[in-house]
Amino acid sequence: MKSGIRVARILGLGLVAVLLLIVSPPSYQPTSRAQDQDDDVVRVSTELVVLNATVIDKSGKFVSGLKPAEFHLFEDGAEQKVLTFTTEQTPFAAAILLDTSGSMETRLTLGRSAALRFLDGLRENDVAAVYNFDVKVQQLQDFSPVHDLPDRMYGLKTKMMTSLNDAVLQAADDLAKREEKRRAIVVLSDGGENYSKASSDKALDHALKASATIYAVNLGPDGPARDIAASGILKNFAEKSGGRYIEAPGGQALRDSFAEIAQELGRQYTIAYRPTNRTRDGKWRKIELKLSRPDVTVRTRKGYKAPKG
């Protein structure tokens, strides 16, 4: 009799699991790395595409209380149906990338200080990992809620070359494994790039695949000495991912910017849709998110690459 009851329980649990899979649509997940072939195309599932969107008013304040009907979502000009819409404040996971290349030799202390300021803004359930990058990328601290830098960060010495793209790619792949829906990459750098194996497009694709928003802080010198091309790299990462590019290298402006980033990540709207275009052509899909409410600005990622083959 006991064995019969046990079998019935097992069958019952199996039926519940099947029903849950039917009722709950799969969240947007990237395919495995084994499926990402050498064509440098990040393959994303067409089942569900997830956007984290920030909405601000003319004064730069976050706009809360918006309803799903106020959002209009387009992919390559074709309107898409919003399937899930979340507004609650939820924990986020962030990856902090500190440039330790030769061009940062006189600004390494500033970079450490900037990283600490961001960690100070973590809430109770937020987590952050810390990386440095020069000729290689190293994770110095795994994702955790601590508000301090690891001891290893204070003994770092600068090295000549810069692997910025590789750092963004590795952080994105690590964030893709996290359970948090809100994910961010905070780049502290002067923007130089001269040693990565990955292209900036491939690094950005991995960030978009992970639904990670990139916030780029330019630690290069102000004025005419600032590297315009390097600044362009940082701006591109931020703009395409729906993040922010921060000019101010230090002082109160930087502290305010980091406080705003932490608030933003906790107050984003999370929107998901299933694309109507199922063609597996590896092409870029342009995303536009518009609001029917006037005098507000919405910021989110600009698109993604479709699967190929």
Image (tube, grey):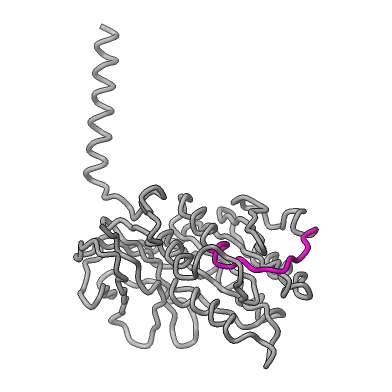
Please report the residue visible at 61 percent of the width from the left and 67 percent of the height from the top: 195
Q: Residue furthest bottom?
A: 224
Q: Nearer the viewer, residue 236 or 134?
A: 134
- Residue 220 occupies quadrant: bottom right
Q: Nearer the viewer, residue 34 or 48?
A: 34
Q: Nearer the viewer, residue 147 or 231?
A: 231
Q: Quadrant of the N terminus?
A: top left
Please report the residue visible at 76 percent of the width from the left and 54 percent of the height from the top: 152
Does residue 59 lie above or below 212 as drawn? Answer: below
Does residue 165 lie above or below 34 as drawn? Answer: below
Coordinates of residue 302 in the picture (x, y in percent): 37, 74
Coordinates of residue 171 in the picture (x, y in percent): 54, 58
Q: Residue furthest top?
A: 1
**Number of numbered discs:** 0
Does residue 20 lie above or below 234 as drawn? Answer: above
Please report the residue visible at 23 percent of the width from the left and 64 percent of the height from the top: 275
The stretch in magenta equals 155-168
Please report the residue visible at 71 percent of the width from the left and 57 percent of the height from the top: 148
- Residue 43 occupies quadrant: bottom left
Q: Quadrant of the C terminus?
A: bottom left
Coordinates of residue 202 in the picture (x, y in percent): 45, 65
Is residue 161 part of the magenta span, yes or no?
yes
Is residue 221 part of the magenta span, yes or no?
no
Coordinates of residue 73 in the picture (x, y in percent): 27, 73
In the displayed structure image, the side of residue 290 where residue 55 appears, left or right: right
